[in-house]
Amino acid sequence: MVTCAEQLPTEIWLMIFRYFEVHYIIQIFHSLNSYFNEIFSSNHLLFYLRLKQTDLTDSLFIKSIFPRTRYLECSLQLRILVILQFLQSYSHQLLQLRKLSIHICRASECHTSSICQLLKQIPHLEHLSLICSLDKISFESILTIQTLKTCHLVLQVSKSLPDQLFTVNHSIKKLRVLFLGNIDNRLIYCLLSHMPDVRQVKISGSYYSFGIQTVFNERLFILSNLRYLKVKFSNGNLNKDCFTELHSIMPCLRYFQFDYSKHILSQSFIDIFLSSWWPIIEQIPYIRINIKGHLRIELNDDNIQMNIEKYRQKLLQRMRQSNNTVNVTWTDRDYHTLTYIEIFIDNFSLKKI
């Protein structure tokens, strides 16, 4: 039995070529017959485009590719002025564009606000991934994109934003923020308070000033639609009220993933965890918590070792009291004057999500 590619339905080819980068598709189609050229010219074939400078002067791209681009990536290798020129000239032609990824390096951060203002001209943008240094004008421009559903921000430098802006975005349902520099609590509050209908939030980064209180230690607003929260912090201080305030801000939270690592944990940390945080954690249906750090101990101090064992037993007791609906894993290792501990609490694997 001999099969011919020409006998495959057009719909199958549209699905296959949708997963290839457009430059490779052009190279392939250049040597193929008119049947494939007909498929390539179909308005139903939408593209993933990794923008190159030469694309801006190619008539094929301007007339045919840009209007059918579904996912556009502007990488770090592309000069920022090329991105700016592209958006100024063709943003109104990106009729099918749903997902956009732009990397703005530190040296070009002065153009961030101009680029963000041009994004408003893209008629159906739903997913924005932006590596940049966010300022007031840029943030307000993002908030005015009423079609935007997912916002992924990688922030190189935190800049102060006003607590209250006039613009509120009700369309954004997913927010992900990664801090490459020091985590800015006020910036997190500003982002969340202007996205009242957000349903999924992921925040990660480090506190380089060890004495700073972590985010969610005060009640400033309520996110009644938030269902999923994933937080990954390094360093920073967690006070006894932080989980209480977090649950007050997000009363309908169903999925909570929390990763926290600190080189030196205070000796009161586990007491706070058991007495103040555990009752709040039990109210959230799905949890996955991983805490890592060191407890400082004095040589020949048996009390510290006894306390560590006492804490371990308390955690295991909590697990038994939950009718084994929560998995608790405790790991500790001694390193001369430090004891490394890791606490892992999980009930995702025990429940049907």
Image (cartoon, grey):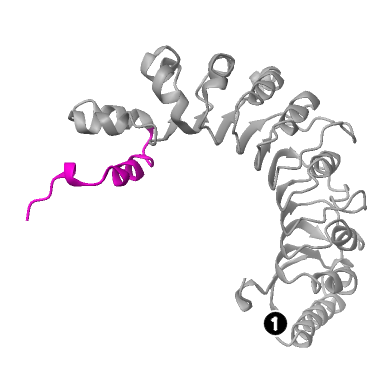
Task: Give SS at disc 1.
Answer: loop
Residue 187 x, y percent position in the rendering:
82, 38
State the image quarter where residue 46 is shown: top left
Depth check: give the residue in front, 75 or 292.
75
Quarter of the image for the C terminus: give it: bottom right
- Residue at the location (26% across, 30% down)? 38
Q: Which residue is mark 1?
A: 325
* Residue positioned most to the left: 1
Q: Residue at x 90, y 70 (%)?
A: 276
Front-lying residue, 70 or 277: 70
Q: Is residue 290 above or below residue 326?
A: above
Is residue 28 among the parts visible in the rendering?
no
Label 1 is placed on what type of residue?
A: Thr
Question: In the rendered picture of this protein, how many numbered marks are placed on residues?
Answer: 1
**118 versus 225 height, above or below:** above
Q: Which residues are magenta?
A: 1-21
Task: Give the side of residue 50 with respect to residue 277, left or right.
Answer: left
Residue drawn 62% across the image and 26% down it: 104
